[in-house]
Amino acid sequence: MARSLQVSPNHLAKVDLALKRRGYPSQKTFAADVGPSLSTVKKFLKGESIDYENFRELCDRLEIDWQTIVHVALDQPPEPVVAELAPFNVGIPVPHPVCFFGRTREISRCFSLLKRLPLQNIAIIGQRRTGKTSLLKHLAALTTVPAKQLRPQQRSDWLPQPEIYQWIFVDFQDARFSTRDGILQYLLKSLGIVTDVPCDLASFMELVSGHLRHPTVILLDEIGVGLQRCPELDDTFWESLRSLATNQTSGNLAFVLASHEAPMQLAAHTGHSSPFFNIFGYTTTLGPLSDLDARALIASSPMLFSPSDTDWILNHSGGWPLLLQILCTNRLMALETQDSDNVWQTEGLQQIAPFQYLLG
């Protein structure tokens, strides 16, 4: 069966950037320099399907790793296997925007700061297990999810042109980001900037400042870990990132960080003095969900909870997302196995005991 490939819609901006970086003023001049026809080149740049060989050749000419931008299609595609989303998630970030509840005020403020140039920098503060990572990933995914995959009345139209945005997620608990070279190479690859030589900080600055032309948001998760455990990420490193965001990229770059304390306090407690940590003009601290949002999360169960069960879960969770997820999971499992006693409540209380600090 013949294979055909197409550029993923999320990476069309990256292809356009690579075209300009290679010095082609138009699709026609690019087509004149490559083997595939002009019509094939146009299809490629529009994200339409073309044959495998031409796709690979065009990516090679643009110095793009084809596997990082491809959306694979077959001439007669098999039915995809779609796993059912779990209604509640314990111990992992919320996997899909349809499963994310609440934080509407925080989401609105963040997108208000990211929908116009220059993009603004944002700090999301919260205790452990308050949903910071879920919120970071939700911001990156929400605006490009098809409306049919969201709940009724769940907004996704926060950005005027969401398809041109680049979102890069950095988890400092990942050992690959414990060195300067590791994080610089990852950022360059995520931006579609190809280099065959080791990249020091000066080269990184030159490459990014010269090629970043689309709104880009770098999400820094668990930044406190990076500050505490990664000595190569020193003040010079952070000062360079500050310079990129404030002076070198025409307002197209912003950072959204997640931490258990305000950026300036975090820097002081870890021995850093870089002015990077004073560029965060908006800081929000995550608290429990409102009663309305907490009830909406509970009501998303595929099996209806009784009013008394709902009230019990609300009372013992305090509206904190993690505790809601744990207690709802226990109640749902009890309903699915037709347990008629209240053992689920005892087990639920045992499971939320390590997180009692959230309840004050």
Image: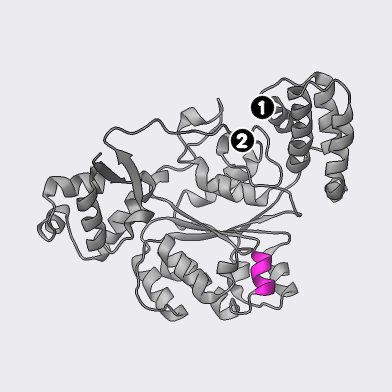
Relative to residue 130, is residue 258 drawn left or right?
A: left
The verdict on residue 189 being magenta is no
Q: Inspect the image, locate mark 2, and give the three-letter code of the amino acid beneath it.
A: Cys
Q: What amino acid type should be assigned to the residue bearing mark 1?
A: Ser
- Above or below residue 243? Residue 358 is above
Task: Sort mark 2 into few (<14), some (14-19) or many (20+) by Cα contacts within 10 Å.
Answer: some
Asked whether 23 or 231 is in front, the reply is: 231
Residue at the (25%, 61%) spot, across then down:
60
Residue 72: x and y, percent? 34, 44
Q: Is residue 136 left or right of residue 67?
A: right
CA separation in Å, label 1 and label 2:
8 Å
Residue 318: quadrant of the picture: top right
- Position of residue 62 in the picture relative to residue 270 (left or right): left
Q: Residue 18 in the image: x percent, y percent?
A: 29, 60
Measuring 70% from the left and 32% from the top, which residue is drawn there? 293
Query: Quick one: label 1, few (<14), some, or many (20+) residues within 10 Å?
Result: some
Percent position of residue 13, x then y = 34, 52
- Residue on which the image places disc 2: 99
On the image, the x and y values in percent for residue 330 come to 78, 33
Q: Residue at x 83, y 48 (%)?
A: 355
Q: Secondary structure at mark 2?
A: helix
Residue at which label 1 appears = 300
- Who is closer to the viewer here, 329 or 227? 329
Q: Earlier in the sequence, mark 1 or mark 2?
A: 2
Q: Secondary structure at mark 1?
A: loop
- Tell me whether the residue at label 1 lies in contact with that at label 2, contact meaning CB atoms closer than 8 angstroms: yes
Give the residues drawn in magenta, as a range.
223-229
